[in-house]
């Protein structure tokens, strides 16, 4: 969350988080989204679905092509 600029973290020794404060960006996010529902990344979901479907069709096509060669 710190990398995305949502919070500011106080680190002790570089590895232990001692405290955290909401940044201005996170405060605006909470005001705009009071129920804290994360926005859905539809592009990622659709892209992943298409990718998985493509992989399934390619694998099925490979099995059909290989079985057609061995049945002749």
Image (cartoon, grey):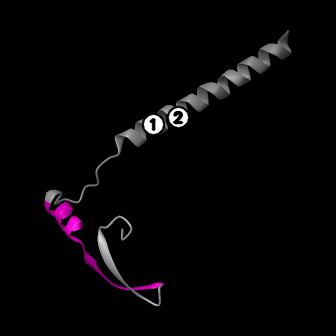
Residue 47 coordinates in the image, percent (x, y): 45, 36
Seen in the image, is 64 located left or right of residue 16? Answer: right
| Nearer to the camera, 36 or 32 | 32
Q: Residue lying farthest top?
A: 72
Magenta span includes 24 = yes
What crowding class fits label 1: few (fewer than 14 Cα within 10 Å), some (14-19), or many (20 or more)?
few
Asked if disc 2 and disc 1 are in contact, CB closer than 8 Å, the reply is yes
At 78% from the left edge and 14% from the top edge, which residue is drawn? Answer: 68
* Magenta stretch, residue numbers: 15-31
Above or below, comparing residue 68 to residue 1 in the picture? above
Q: Residue at x 54, y 35 (%)?
A: 52
Say whether residue 36 is left or right of residue 65.
left
Q: Residue at x 24, y 72 (%)?
A: 23
- Disc assigned to residue 47: 1
Alpha carbon distance from label 2 to label 1: 6 Å
Q: Which mark is residue 26?
A: none
Which numbered dot is residue 51?
Answer: 2
Counting from the top left corner in percent of width and height, residue 39 is at 28, 50
């Amino acid at each position: 969350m710190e990398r995305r600029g949502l919070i500011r973290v106080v680190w002790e020794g570089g590895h232990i988080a001692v405290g955290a404060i909401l940044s201005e960006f996170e405060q605006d996010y909470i005001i705009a989204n009071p129920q804290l529902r994360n926005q859905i990344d539809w592009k990622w979901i659709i892209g992943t679905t298409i990718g998985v479907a493509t992989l399934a069709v390619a694998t099925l096509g490979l099995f059909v092509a290989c079985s057609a060669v061995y049945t002749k």
